[in-house]
Amino acid sequence: MLGFRGAFRYVANPEVFNLELQAIKNVREKYENLELMVPFVRSPEELTRVRKLVATQGLFEKPSFKFLMMVEIPVNVIQIEDFIKVGIDGVSIGSNDLTMLIEGTDRDNSDVATEFNEMRPAVLWALERVIKKCNEAGITSSICGQAPSVYEELVQKLVRWGITSISVNPDSIDRVRGTVAHAEKDI
């Protein structure tokens, strides 16, 4: 999970990233609903460097282009206002990675997987903080990961906090849709 990946890789290998950006630009000539979501961003400065690389490819010239960021490491939560100031259009919270890194657990390691729990206060605080800061800034917030498919009470909290969208497993769509509808009535 840790190491040479995400935004750091983009900055370290701009030639490779520029090829990816050119491919995005080519696809967007016909399909403007393709957006860019930057994963594993370690600092606002790193995000700024990625943004500059994206700008060199002219992607920001079209207003329909969205520059999004994954929230999956604790620094993203702690400095969310600074990341927003760089100029993102929204975030997607990767609840699996964020939970593992907040709790110091590994859901894929049977020795510690029992300690993985998205409903712990520290994780809930992080989710609420990010969603509310995004709302204050007028940008979108979404969540991906296992948690919304498992915990009905989490879905209710996410709706109350003002999340824009929730990603769930296909077998959970109907149940979660009902939970969202009920929670929205209570707002």
Image: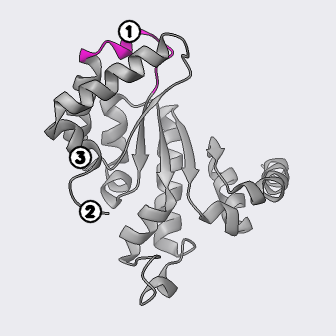
Q: Nearer the viewer, residue 169 or 48?
A: 169
Tag of residue 61:
1
| Mark 2 residue crowding within 10 angstroms, few (<14) / some (14–19) / many (20+) | few
In this rendering, the label closer to the viewer, 2 or 1:
2
Return the residue at label 3: 43
Of label 3 and label 1, which has the lower sequence position?
Answer: 3
Q: In which image quadrant can residue 54 be found?
A: top left
Instruction: Measure the alpha-carbon separation of dots 3 and 2.
Output: 15 Å
Instruction: Give the quarter of the figure containing the N terminus.
Output: bottom left
Judge from the rendering whether residue 15 lies leftward or rightward of residue 22; answer left or right. left
Which is more foreground, mark 3 or mark 2? 2
In three-dimensional space, the C-alpha distance between marks 2 and 1, rounded to whole angstroms, equals: 33 Å
Q: Measuring 46% from the left and 71% from the top, which residue is drawn there?
A: 122
Question: How is the model colour-coded?
Answer: one colour
Q: Secondary structure at mark 3?
A: loop
> Neighbour class for label 1 at 10 Å: few (<14), some, many (≥20)?
few
**Along the line of sight, the residue nearer the viewer: 13 or 123:** 13
Residue under label 2, please give it: 2
- Spot the residue most to the bottom: 111
Determine whether the residue tagged by mark 2 lies in a helix, strand or loop.
loop
The disc at residue 21 is: none
Of helix, strand and loop, which mostly describes the magenta segment? loop
Q: Which residues are magenta?
A: 56-66
Q: Is residue 130 above or below residue 97?
A: above
Question: Which amino acid, mark 2?
Answer: Leu
What amino acid type is highlighted by mark number 1?
Glu
**Residue 65, percent from left and from top:** 46, 19
Camera-side mark, 3 or 1: 1
The image quadrant of residue 147 is bottom right
Q: Secondary structure at mark 1?
A: helix
